[in-house]
Amino acid sequence: AQTVTQSQPEMSVQEAETVTLSCTYDTSENNYYLFWYKQPPSRQMILVIRQEAYKQQNATENRFSVNFQKAAKSFSLKISDSQLGDTAMYFCALNIYNQGGKLIFGQGTELSVKP
Amino acid sequence: EADIYQTPRYLVIGTGKKITLECSQTMGHDKMYWYQQDPGMELHLIHYSYGVNSTEKGDLSSESTVSRIRTEHFPLTLESARPSHTSQYLCASSVEGLANEKLFFGSGTQLSVL
């Protein structure tokens, strides 16, 4: 069985600072994808960033980047130059190759960006 | 902004009532999903569909049922609502391709059963 664990229920960061959200996962599969989703207070979940497990290079999307450590099964999200609009619940998710959109989610980290 | 819509946004209903949560997408996606999310908790897949007339149960057991008569529509029904069904229900859709199953989510339906 696959699991995803986010050990930080809540975090806060000052505007313009950098914050890192942690995520660990467990799977015996070799081909999979990892995602970070953002759920703002309006509650529509949106994709922040994704990583293919076969790629060693860490994914980057503007101010968002990941630190993917496959051997350690770790997938952290770094948000640089935090903005007030980054305040949201962040979910780490695992998708096994060829299992369609059946994602396994972590418990979420509630991030507050303070002015 | 994703073109996937859920109604109602909030629903408060008494025990024993039959309810249907609506989900529609205008992107032509073959794959659609229902996730259940309790407050402060992770999402759990309860139903999914890979196309018209195809429905499967997800990882989390649910007393709800779904149907997929049209590509764009994936409603979820509870025949007899109970307080244990109180939760947030999120609908999503995806298309396999470059983004390897990027999911688009609706805004969710917050269901409260009294």
Image (tube, coloured by chain):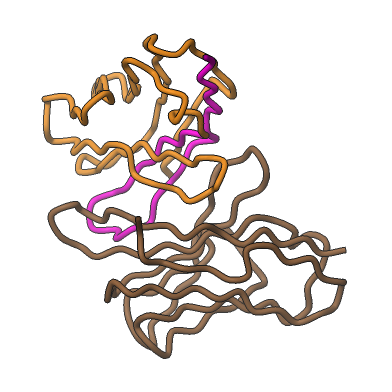
Chain colours: A orange, B brown
Q: Is residue A109 left or right of residue B8?
A: left
Residue A35 image-quadrant placement: top left
Residue B9: x %, y % from top left: 62, 63
Residue A99: x %, y % from top left: 30, 58
Residue B113 image-quadrant placement: bottom right
Camera-side residue of A99 and B81: B81
Q: Is residue B108 above or below residue A87?
A: below
Q: Main secondary structure of the magenta part?
A: strand
Q: Which residue is drawn at the image coordinates 11% and 25% (left, top)?
A: A57
Tally of marks: 0
Residue A78: x %, y % from top left: 33, 19
Q: Is residue A60 left or right of residue A34?
A: left
Camera-side residue of B36 and B22: B22
In the image, which residues are magenta? A89-115
Q: Which residue is drawn at the image coordinates 54% and 48% (left, top)?
A: A43
Q: Is residue A71 above or below residue A53?
A: above
Q: Which residue is drawn at the image coordinates 44% and 65% (left, top)?
A: B33
Outermost front residue: A115
Camera-side residue of B100 and B54: B100
Q: Is residue B100 left or right of residue A84?
A: left
Residue B105: x %, y % from top left: 42, 57
Is residue A14 on the magenta stretch?
Answer: no
Q: Where is the N terminus of chain B found, in terms of image quarters? A: bottom left
